[in-house]
Amino acid sequence: MSPPTIICTADGSHTLYVPELKEHYHSIHGAIAESMHVFIHAGLDAALLNKPRLHILEVGFGTGLNALLTLLYAPDFLITYTAIEPFPPDPLLIAQLNYPQLLAKAECEALYKALMAAPQKVPTPITPNFTLRKKREQIQQIMLDSNTFDLVYFDAFAPDIQPELWETAVFKKIHDALSPEGILVTYSSKGLVKRNLRAAGFVVERLPGPAGKRHITRAVKR
Ligand SMILES: C[S@@+](CC[C@H](N)C(=O)[O-])C[C@H]1O[C@@H](n2cnc3c(N)ncnc32)[C@H](O)[C@@H]1O
């Protein structure tokens, strides 16, 4: 299998392209722009309205961009971040990504390195307020404790590419793992995704999307 390659997206930020799947890790219209729009503004901002400390679950940690943006965006909030990623990208590739340069905060490079170098399984403090726990497992198989997470970044490959990750059974597991009023956000607004989220018990809303995408989805456990 040939390794992913680095691609520059429309806002100048990098993403990875997987030749076998003909799929990118982020939108080609802007990787940082998409992550900010979907996960930070539609997800993190909404979750922080209710709670000053959050337990976040990311499905598909990949390049760690969503964790880095979360860390930079909400440094004063207490965040525990559980990251599921069964196939972590090669660290040599990660080292070439331009997120620290573009985000241009003094501490950004060191924080990104710390996020990506954190060991599996062990809760690892990245800052005094932000603790990361990586899990090298697949979302279909992983066991999640009930009522644990406040916010889920659902960032799997697209439903056409990996339909098994978007099934009702997976969303039911996540629904059970969320606390009351917990939120799931994802970039996909496909009809099947929204139907499966509703079948899993979520209240689903469609929100405007970032460049190149009409809509995204936010789902709440009520
Ligand atoms: C759209 S990309 C990830 C984007 C990532 N959030 C980022 O910012 O780089 C999807 C990710 O899901 C991961 N993945 C593949 N199969 C998975 C599974 N069964 N469970 C969880 N994640 C999976 C892939 O390895 C990939 O890193």
Image (cartoon, rainbow, N blue to C red):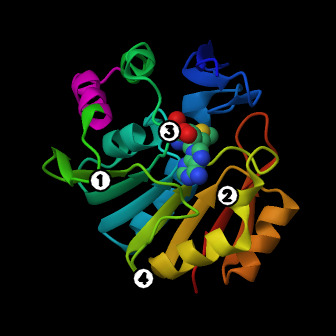
Q: Quadrant of the N terminus?
A: top right
Residue bearing mark 1: 133
Q: Position of residue 183 (x, y in %)?
A: 54, 70
Q: Is residue 187 magenta?
A: no
Q: Amino acid at mark 1?
A: Arg
Query: Is disc 3 surrounded by few (<14), some (14 to 19) or many (20+) residues within 10 Å?
Result: few
Query: Is disc 1 surrounded by few (<14), some (14 to 19) or many (20+) residues within 10 Å?
Result: some
**Identity of the residue drawn at 45% across and 35% down:** 88
Q: Position of residue 108 (x, y in %)?
A: 28, 26
Residue bearing mark 4: 146
Real-space Cα distance between discs 3 and 4? 25 Å
Above/below status of 38 relative to 100: below
Which quadrant of the figure has residue 20?
Answer: top right
Residue bearing mark 3: 87
Give the camera-side residue of 116 and 137.
137
Instruction: Please tell me which of labels 3 and 4 falls first in the chain.
Output: 3
Residue bearing mark 2: 165
Q: Amino acid at mark 4?
A: Ser
Instruction: Please tell me which of labels 3 and 2 falls first in the chain.
Output: 3
Real-space Cα distance between discs 4 and 2? 19 Å
Which quadrant of the figure has residue 64?
Answer: top left
- Disc 3, disc 1: CB below 8 Å? no
Q: Which residues are magenta?
A: 104-116
Closer to the observer: label 3 or label 4?
3
- Disc 1, disc 2: CB below 8 Å? no
Q: Amino acid at mark 2?
A: Leu
Instruction: Classify mark 1: helix, strand or loop.
Output: strand
